[in-house]
């Protein structure tokens, strides 16, 4: 009945048959039943089972503990009966989640977590225990693996090679992926099940056996007589599901014999969770979670043998805050003057060439356009406010030139070129106070400011020389979240404030009545001084016919006879006329349209940013739309504004290169206008500015250089501070604004350069790969800012409400990226509706609320100081946040702080030395399924703990921090 095939294939089959015959007496008498083993093992006998001990020994044999298993594509083929005969058909496939062929065979199901019958796993265990297991088999074709491959006489052998090459599903698999083939079916010529599990020594391309052209590593075949409905199908699904488990994959790759494979199944069964059949619908498909647990936490016997684990106990690793998140080689003291600076230069120098070549990607174009418009808007906004605060000694043009010059120099020579320099709110507050002080005491503002800038540069160099950046280790999440929340709220508040100011400039007549439409008019009176009516002054009498003649008649400028002319509002006022009428002060359409553009831009930015996680259109198109979301939103609403044709306020850019205040020049002289002692007295306010610059710069640098962003080129805290200090000299001498890292815009810059995997499995969130680290996007942004003076004819079509909507989007995204926002929401939620966050499992809710209340109180104090005359001490209050955080250790236990915040350096060292008591914590799984906040799941700078292999993009709120 069987054709003999010479060579190893025949020997393999004969061995399989002999193995099956030897165990014939152990098989049940019923030919329709597959073996059902009874797995009996004693619980409580030891802390770890014998199977777990065997698996642990197998995994310890790996050459590298962190070696990553190749991704497996698993295909389930079933031998089905068709009118033409027996035929192999693909019925399901797995990468990480299961996809089934729907009834009709024309479409795939949505990816879902496979739900297996418990008995199918027991049956699979018996099949592998009683069947044949061939490990490290040398074979190069299917016929060499099984000699009687054609015994089943299928009418059609799998898929054609041309179909494999055309299959787009291959794009979802990364290079180096391997294939596992699972083949099950019923045949008439067998009386008992025939099982073989094969692991090839070297991966081999088995022709058209699978739908994708990747080499195969594993092969599982189960053939047998007729059994109960779908019995073989469910065993095949169980085998495929086992192979999707990374722990079992490692065991299968390292197994030496059949018992090792069985031990891997037993460990899988030990971790199995059973759902009661009466409590859920077995036909329901469980959607994939937004994040998966780290497979290393499932290794038998704990993680102590893994080389990458920090700490000596599992409890120490479970607490996200125990290891301080900022401690790295960039912040280690060398004990030498400028030692940290030298190390920064040595660290960044090898990457300098790649900092330009790595920018050759279309994503960088999107980042340049997005950040350019944000930077231009910020320069105009702060330039206008600086002009108001300093009598135009610094205005919009100075803001443009300073941003272009300082930003370009910083991007070329800094340690973290992804940082965007800008004028910030705290610096603006200091400038306003300094100008008022100079006016009150008859001092020359620019000369006084020059000496302050020189002293700040000197103090900055001292901080660089003494490696003061080492102190950023004391900036825990408490300090970072307070500062980030403040800056985010400033962005939100300023955007709303600007829109309200537009409503005042273009007021709406809220008292308008349709019946009084005939009473509303506005005309120009050139004959005599008049009155400009305002409000809904319906009692104002209409002009008489004689007055109307005077309204619309005027003498030409060159003399001659009187000719009637229709005058515009500007023409009327320029000729000394008076506006007369009840509707002269109201421009209802402009204000309403401005708010529509403002809100529409914000919503469009948010929707397009989340578009890549939608189900519409191909993945590549969705990702492209998400990358260019801000630019697309701006273009859409600019087009709407142009189509409607209303005169909404537009982006106005200076068109001449001359100082805003004609009384000043481009160079500020250090002597001549102020007494000699001013150069010494300037050191006092310079101390406050130094604190402000240091805190603002380093907190932003800490946020941008977090490990969660997976930066590969290292940080440069000392080098960044040196660049900012030297730029203080140049901007002070030229009378340009002072610049420091802008937290919100820098975070937006990082978010626009996120790299994600392009080969994510169906149902799997794209893996965050890191940030596209380069210098070219920032350099291009600042160069474009400088030449914007010559782009005024183009930029004048951009409505200001659209740019304010972008500002609002940036502020909201940054605010939603911090854990503080989640904890504020908890204050408004009943306990039963609160999400399952990790810190809520370990910290009592009242302690969480107390910690949040203290943060809110500190934020309120910072806001009040910023907005009042007490703003001079604002830098000191920023520094005081570190002291307040230190004082929290008197209120909260170290256990609570380790979940709600990071542990400060000295405290962490004391605990490591055993000087402080440490609560024993039971190891808990951090698996939880939650909704995605930003859609893009934008990394956040506030992730306290991550699942290995995943990035900030899928957000797991149970973790310490979230994505941005």
Image (cartoon, grey):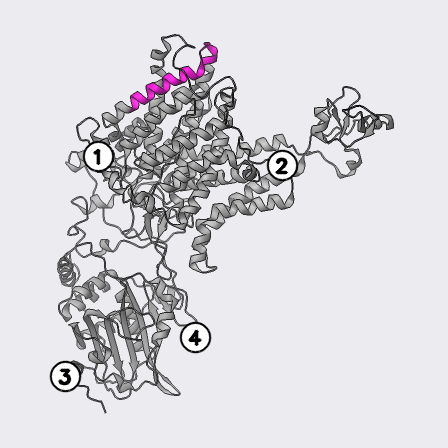
Density class for disc 4 (Cα within 10 Å; few <14, some 14-19, many ≥20) is: few
Task: Kindly identify which residue carries mark 2.
Answer: 591
Residue 496 placement (x, y as % from top left): 53, 34
Earlier in the chain: of badge 4 and badge 2, it is: 4
The residue most toward the bottom is 1
Task: Kindly identify which residue carries mark 4.
Answer: 103
Q: Split into 4 quadrants, where in the image is the C terminus? A: top left
Above or below, 348 against 211 in this view is above
Residue closest to the eye, 851 or 16: 16
Residue 835 placement (x, y as % from top left): 39, 48
Check whether the beta carbons of the residues at disc 4 and disc 1 lie within 8 A of each other.
no
Secondary structure at numbered mark 2: helix
Nearer the camera: disc 1 or disc 3: 1
Q: How many marks?
A: 4
Q: Quadrant of residue 869?
A: top left
Magenta-tinted stretch = 437-460
Nearer the camera: disc 4 or disc 1: 1
Q: Provide the major secondary structure of the magenta segment.
A: helix
Task: Kindly identify which residue carries mark 3.
Answer: 18
Check whether the beta carbons of the residues at disc 1 and disc 3 lie within 8 A of each other.
no
The Cα–Cα distance between marks 4 and 2, rounded to whole angstroms, is 57 Å
Secondary structure at numbered mark 3: helix
Density class for disc 1 (Cα within 10 Å; few <14, some 14-19, many ≥20) is: some
Check whether the beta carbons of the residues at disc 1 and disc 2 lie within 8 A of each other.
no
Task: Kindly identify which residue carries mark 1.
Answer: 343
Nearer the camera: disc 3 or disc 2: 2
103 in magenta: no
């Amino acid at each position: 009945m069987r054709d003999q095939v010479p060579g190893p294939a025949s020997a393999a089959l004969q061995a399989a048959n002999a193995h099956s015959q030897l165990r014939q007496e152990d098989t049940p008498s019923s030919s329709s039943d597959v073996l059902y083993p009874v797995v009996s093992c004693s619980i409580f006998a030891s802390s770890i089972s014998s199977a777990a001990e065997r698996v642990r020994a197998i995994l310890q044999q790996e050459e590298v503990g962190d070696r990553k298993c190749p991704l497996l594509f698993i295909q389930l083929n079933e031998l089905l009966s068709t009118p033409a005969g027996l035929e192999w058909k693909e019925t399901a496939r797995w990468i990480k989640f299961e996809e089934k062929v729907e009834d009709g065979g024309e479409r795939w199901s949505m990816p879902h977590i496979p739900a297996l019958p418990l008995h199918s796993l027991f049956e699979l265990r018996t099949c592998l225990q009683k069947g044949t297991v061939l490990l490290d088999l040398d074979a190069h074709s299917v016929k060499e693996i099984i000699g009687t491959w054609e015994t089943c006489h299928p009418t059609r052998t799998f898929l054609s090679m041309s179909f494999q090459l055309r299959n787009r599903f291959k794009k979802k698999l990364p290079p180096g992926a391997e294939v596992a083939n699972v083949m099950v079916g019923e045949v008439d010529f067998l009386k008992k099940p025939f099982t073989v599990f094969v692991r090839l020594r070297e991966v081999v391309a088995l022709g058209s056996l699978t739908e994708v052209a990747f080499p195969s590593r594993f092969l599982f075949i189960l053939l047998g007589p007729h059994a109960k409905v779908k019995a073989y199908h469910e065993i095949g699904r169980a085998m495929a599901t086992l192979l999707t488990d990374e722990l079992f994959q490692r065991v299968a790759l390292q197994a030496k014999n059949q018992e090792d494979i069985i031990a891997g199944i037993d460990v899988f069964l030990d971790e199995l969770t059973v759902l009661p059949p009466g409590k859920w619908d077995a036909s329901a498909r469980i959607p994939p979670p937004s994040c998966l647990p780290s497979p290393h936490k499932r290794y038998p016997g704990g993680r102590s043998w893994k080389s990458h684990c920090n700490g000596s106990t599992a409890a120490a690793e479970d607490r996200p805050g125990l290891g301080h998140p900022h401690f790295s080689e960039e912040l280690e003291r060398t004990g030498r003057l400028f030692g940290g600076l030298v190390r920064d230069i040595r660290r960044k120098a090898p990457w300098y060439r790649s900092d330009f070549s790595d920018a050759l990607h279309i994503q960088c174009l999107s980042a340049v356009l997005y950040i350019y418009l944000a930077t231009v808007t910020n320069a105009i906004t702060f330039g206008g406010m600086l002009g108001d605060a300093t009598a135009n000694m610094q205005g919009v043009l100075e803001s443009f030139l300073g941003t272009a010059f300082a930003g370009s120099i910083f991007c070329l020579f800094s340690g973290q070129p992804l940082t965007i320099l800008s004028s910030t709110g705290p610096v603006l507050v200091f400038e306003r106070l300094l100008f008022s002080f100079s006016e009150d005491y008859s001092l020359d503002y620019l000369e006084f400011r020059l000496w302050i800038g020189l002293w700040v540069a000197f103090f900055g160099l001292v901080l660089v020389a003494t490696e003061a950046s080492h102190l950023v280790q004391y900036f825990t999440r408490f300090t970072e979240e307070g500062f980030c929340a403040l800056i985010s709220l400033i962005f939100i508040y300023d955007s709303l404030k600007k829109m309200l100011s537009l409503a005042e400039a273009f007021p709406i007549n809220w008292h308008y009545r349709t019946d009084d439409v005939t009473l509303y008019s506005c005309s120009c009176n050139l004959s005599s001084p008049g009155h400009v009516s305002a409000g809904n002054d319906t009692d104002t009498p209409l002009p008489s016919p004689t007055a109307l003649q005077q309204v619309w008649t005027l003498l030409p400028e060159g003399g001659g006879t009187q000719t009637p002319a229709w005058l515009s509002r500007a023409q009327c006022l320029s000729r000394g006329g008076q506006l007369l009428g009840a509707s002269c002060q109201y421009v209802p359409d402009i204000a309403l349209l401005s708010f529509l553009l403002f809100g529409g831009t914000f919503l469009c930015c948010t929707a397009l940013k989340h578009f890549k996680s939608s189900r519409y259109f191909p993945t590549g198109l969705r990702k492209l739309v998400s990358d260019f979301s801000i630019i697309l939103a701006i273009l859409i609403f600019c087009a709407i504004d142009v189509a409607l044709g209303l005169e909404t306020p537009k982006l106005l850019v200076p068109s001449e290169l001359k100082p805003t205040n004609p009384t000043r020049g481009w160079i500020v002289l250090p002597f001549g206008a102020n007494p000699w002692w001013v150069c010494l007295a300037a050191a006092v306010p310079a101390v406050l500015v130094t604190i402000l610059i240091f805190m603002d710069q380093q907190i932003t640098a800490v946020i941008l250089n977090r490990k969660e962003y997976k930066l590969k080129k290292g940080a440069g805290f000392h080098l960044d501070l040196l660049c900012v200090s030297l730029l203080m000299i140049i901007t002070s001498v030229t009378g340009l604004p002072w610049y420091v890292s802008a937290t919100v815009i820098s975070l937006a810059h990082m978010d626009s350069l996120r790299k994600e995997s392009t080969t994510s499995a169906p149902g799997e969130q794209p893996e965050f790969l890191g940030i596209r680290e380069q210098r070219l996007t920032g350099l291009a942004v600042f160069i474009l800012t400088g030449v914007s003076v010559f782009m005024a004819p183009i930029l004048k079509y951009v409505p200001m409400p659209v740019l304010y909507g972008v500002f609002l989007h940036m502020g909201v995204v940054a605010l939603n990226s911090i854990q503080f926002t989640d904890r504020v929401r908890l204050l408004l939620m009943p306990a039963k509706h609160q999400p399952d966050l990790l810190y809520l499992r370990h910290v009592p809710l009242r302690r969480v609320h107390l910690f949040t209340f203290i943060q809110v109180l500190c934020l309120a104090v910072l806001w009040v100081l910023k907005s009042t005359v007490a703003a001079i001490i604002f830098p000191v209050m920023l520094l005081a946040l570190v002291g307040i955080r230190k004082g929290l250790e008197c209120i909260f236990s170290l256990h609570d702080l380790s979940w709600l915040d990071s542990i400060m350096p000295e405290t962490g060292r004391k605990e490591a030395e055993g000087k402080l008591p440490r609560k024993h914590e039971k190891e808990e799984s951090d698996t939880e399924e939650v909704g995605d906040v930003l859609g893009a799941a934008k990394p956040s700078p506030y992730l306290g703990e991550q699942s290995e292999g995943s990035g900030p993009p899928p957000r797991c709120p149970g973790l310490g921090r979230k994505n941005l």
